[in-house]
Image: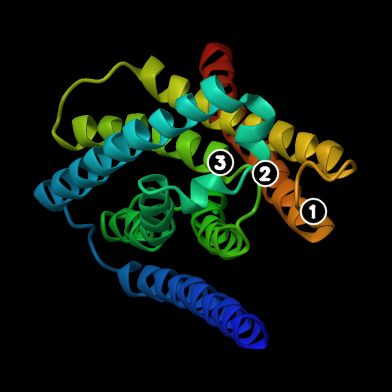
Amino acid sequence: MLTHFITSLNFFLFCRHISFSFALVYLLLIFALQHVMKERRGYSLRMPLILWSLSLAIFSIAGTRRTLMYMSHTLSTNGFKHSVCSHGFYNGPVSKFWAYVFVLSKVLELGDTVFIILRKQRLIFLHWYHHATVLLYSWYAYRGMVPGGGWFMSINYWVHSIMYSYYTARASGLKVPRMLAMVITIAQILQMLMGITVNILIYYWQQDDACSASVEQIFWSLLIYFSYLMLFCHFFFEAYFKGQSKTKRD
């Protein structure tokens, strides 16, 4: 018993150390790279970007298929409450693999920012804040087997499957309707609303011991999702409404 506790504690501290190290290195690297690129011309990187986006699109589509299959099975056999509160997503024979690679993929996705900087595109606060904190929270949720993880990860896989497919098409030079970009942002906003809803349900069901979640887990999850909701709503207004209203006035 004591050995198991010590092993779990060491794993917890190791994961926390690693995730914070990745996030810190990421932030230092991107701002240092911005400084290096300040007086340089941006690179095209068309083919590397196509391959990068396509790889992440295929990965996300595969993750969506496998995780949604698990969630659909859980919903049909045990109901919605069980799908939220159960830790089965972290332990299932197939789902545990996709939960594990999901967490690892948050390190890989930091490369998105490198392409933005090297191509001299505008790096907004939402982008790097989202990447850094998703990395931290994903590792935190995985090591603590936070309830609702199946919903958090499967929806994120689904949104990313659309988003990276869109990026692949854009990088390939295909004409993609502007409406699709708006739909992706709306999907991201709905993802945050779903995350907040799931956390509220976890808190409610935790009162009668149906969900084994700590107040700390619920607090951090709600804080993260609420901050994302505010930032994505602000981005949506700035990108799709403010610019259009300025154009009409001009």
Tell me the CA gap for discs 1 and 3.
15 Å
- The first of marks 3 and 2 along the sequence is 3
Q: Nearer the viewer, mark 3 or mark 2?
A: 3
Residue 59, given in percent of the width and then of the height, sits at 26, 44
Is 69 in front, or is 223?
69
Image position, residue 23 (x, y; %): 50, 71
Labels 1 and 3 touching (C-beta < 8 A): no
Closest to the observer, 216 or 41: 216
Q: Disc 1 or disc 2, which is closer to the eye?
A: 1
Residue occupying the point 54% across, 46% down: 88
The residue wearing badge 2 is 225
The tag earlier along the polypeptide, 1 or 3, is 3
Q: Is residue 63 left or right of residue 221?
A: left
Local packing at callout 2 (Cα closer than 10 Å; few below 14, some 14-19, many 20+) is: many
Q: Which residue is mark 3?
A: 152
**Residue at 34 percent of width and 36 percent of height:** 66
- In the picture, measured across the screen, residue 10 lies left or right of residue 183, that is right
The three-letter code of the residue at mark 1 reads Phe
Secondary structure type for disc 2:
helix
Which of the 4 image quarters holds residue 208?
Answer: top right
Q: Is residue 58 above or below residue 71?
A: below
Q: Is residue 234 in view? A: no
Q: Which badge, 1 or 2, comes first in the chain's sequence?
A: 1
Q: Amino acid at mark 3?
A: Phe
Give residue 104's mark: none
Q: CA distance from mark 3 to mark 2?
A: 10 Å
- What's the CA distance linking mark 1 and mark 2? 10 Å
Residue type (three-letter) at the residue carrying disc 2: Tyr
- Residue 31 visible within the image: yes
Q: Which residue is mark 1?
A: 219
Residue 250 locus on image (x, y percent): 53, 16
